[in-house]
Image: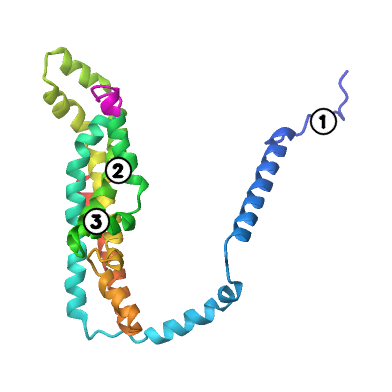
Amino acid sequence: MVSMDARPDEWARFTPRQRLQRFAIFLVTVAAVAWSLGSIDIVWAWVFDAPQQMGDLIGRMAPPDFTNIGPILRVLLETVNIATIATAVAVILSLPVAYLAAQNTTPNAATLWLARLILVSSRSVNTIIWALLFVAIFGPGAMAGIVAITFRSLGFIGKLLGEAIEEIDRRPVEALTATGASRFKVILYAIVPQVMPTFWAVSILRWDINLRESTVLGLVGAGGIGIILQGAIDTFNWREAATVLLAILALVILGELVSAWVRRRII
């Protein structure tokens, strides 16, 4: 006879071994963070003084100086053009690379690894580093910024499109192939319709990202509104710097609204 006082085993989300493993990971993480903080040179006096310095800087920025609003708007338009042109070129270049980077469409292993090497190389270098390189090649100006953003965007767009191609339904491809359709027709009628939503979503997202990235390219001489911002900071013209920052904020908000509107219309 089972006693009425018997109690079932208490439920636990993790076993004792799992709890020990999680605690060990926590300790390792804390130790890594502590080691990182101790290995870098941080002047803590400046850190604690930062709120006061920030308040002083904001005070010097107010009120913003709109005297040069004309040149600021012209360079702001150049910033939009850099992002738009670079995104368009990157989208075009990424299509064949994405096709070769997908395991179910690439002709052979050599083209697969070549395409993936291109995508990895593009994503592994930050846009500012690309901009520094192309400023040395093309000289200061918008061209260096366009090429830098294009190279950076190529890996982002190509990778996501390549993954979308790998996840397509194979049945339309097999049906068209069985009818004797050419490779081009298989791509056009079986693959493209399935990846179009991803294509538009990724393209719009990348344009939105590039719009933000293009605002800082001028800091290294690659065109855009960052040139005026750098000049204002170098001359301690904080009121004009505040105007530039407000213009960048307005541009980013406008870009977010435009991308959301286009996404609702297309996708």
One can see residue 222 in this view = yes
| Residue 13: % across, % down | 67, 36
SS of the residue at dot 1? loop
| Residue 37: % across, % down | 61, 60
Q: Residues within 10 Å of mark 2 (few under 14, many from 20)?
A: many
- The first of marks 3 and 2 along the sequence is 3
Give me the residue at 53% from left, 78% from top.
51
Q: Label the magenta part by its dominant secondary structure.
A: loop
**Which residue position is annotated with label 2?**
155
Label disc, if present, on residue 7 of the rendered structure: 1
Location of the C terminus (image quadrant): top left
Residue 137, magenta (yes or no) = no
Q: Quadrant of residue 233?
A: bottom left
Q: Residues within 10 Å of mark 1 (few under 14, many from 20)?
A: few
Is 265 left or right of 31, judged from the image as shown? left
Tell me whether circle 1 and circle 2 mark residues in contact (CB < 8 Å): no
Is 17 left or right of 127, judged from the image as shown? right
SS of the residue at dot 2? helix
Please state which amino acid type lies under the numbered disc 2: Gly
Please state which amino acid type lies under the numbered disc 3: Phe
Mark closer to the observer (1, 2): 2
SS of the residue at dot 3? helix
Which color scheme is applied?
rainbow
Mark closer to the observer (3, 2): 3
**In the image shown, does 84 or 227 lie closer to the viewer?**
227
**Which residue position is annotated with label 3?**
134
- The first of marks 3 and 1 along the sequence is 1
Read off the magenta span: 103-112
Please state which amino acid type lies under the numbered disc 1: Arg
| Residue 161: % across, % down | 27, 37
Location of the N terminus (image quadrant): top right
